[in-house]
Image (cartoon, rainbow, N blue to C red):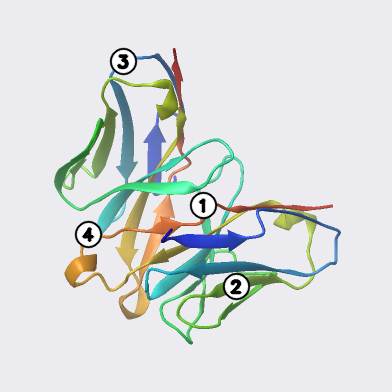
Amino acid sequence: NAGVTQTPKFQVLKTGQSMTLQCAQDMNHNSMYWYRQDPGMGLRLIYYSASEGTTDKGEVPNGYNVSRLNKREFSLRLESAAPSQTSVYFCASSPLPRTGSYSNYGYTFGSGTRLTVV
Amino acid sequence: KNEVEQSPQNLTAQEGEFITINCSYSVGISALHWLQQHPGGGIVSLFMLSSGKKKHGRLIATINIQEKHSSLHITASHPRDSAVYICAVSRESNFGNEKLTFGTGTRLTIIP
């Protein structure tokens, strides 16, 4: 099925461990995003990529790195996990700029990764 | 004050009732999005609108740009509509990209 695929769905890390969250989309979208969702707060942008080969920081980039490997894939890496990074992480994509058949197309989100750092 | 405010935060209703969830925002926007998140689930985009009204099945979304306000309506509500509904606004940012700002969501529970 077309969409955004995130792996893994669940992960428990010990403080100081590293891991990479994978995200892939098959909709030929230019833009991809990583968000985190914490209780009582709206989703917050960690990093985004407007196109293959470019990445930019969002609101809460500290402690994270990203790689836009190709147009399909956008990974998020935690180099040294901390308990404050316990959260649900969502990858999303969007066909920006919205032209032609994409003019009414919003965002497509993955199913999320629930990460616990102990 | 948050740039995107939703009300109510929680809403419980009986099956069949007409549901309204409100979203107010305080910034200039290029579009407003309504999203749905089931418990433990992913996020699904319901609507993207920049003016007027859109309808999909039993869901209707309206926006008043002058008043900076949007509503999401659900007609003939059903227990499967139980979810968190999230309002988000998009604004243009650098290099033709756009920034999404999210509300904190409205938790809807429909009782059979």
- Residues at badges 3 and 4 in contact (C-beta under 8 Å)? no
What x and y, as percent, mark residue A12?
Answer: 79, 54
User: Which mark is drawn over residue A43?
Assistant: 1
B47 relative to B101 in the view: left or right? left
Residue closer to the observer: B21 or A22: A22
Determine the image quadrant of residue B77: top left
**Disc 1 from disc 4: Cα separation:** 22 Å
Chain at tag 2? A
What x and y, as percent, mark residue A42?
Answer: 50, 47
Chain at tag 3? B
Where does label 3 land, which residue? Answer: B17
Q: Secondary structure at mark 1?
A: loop
What x and y, as percent, mark residue A34?
Answer: 54, 64
Q: Amino acid at mark 2?
A: Ser
Chain at tag 1? A
B93 relative to A44 in the view: left or right? left
> Is A17 placed above or below B29 here?
below
Q: Amino acid at mark 1?
A: Leu
**Disc 4 from disc 2: Cα separation:** 27 Å
What x and y, as percent, mark residue A16?
Answer: 85, 66
Q: Amino acid at mark 3?
A: Glu
Q: Amino acid at mark 4?
A: Asn
Q: Secondary structure at mark 2?
A: strand
**Disc 1 from disc 2: Cα separation:** 18 Å
**Disc 1 from disc 3: Cα separation:** 29 Å
Q: Earlier in the sequence, mark 1 or mark 2?
A: 1
Where does label 4 land, which residue? Answer: A104
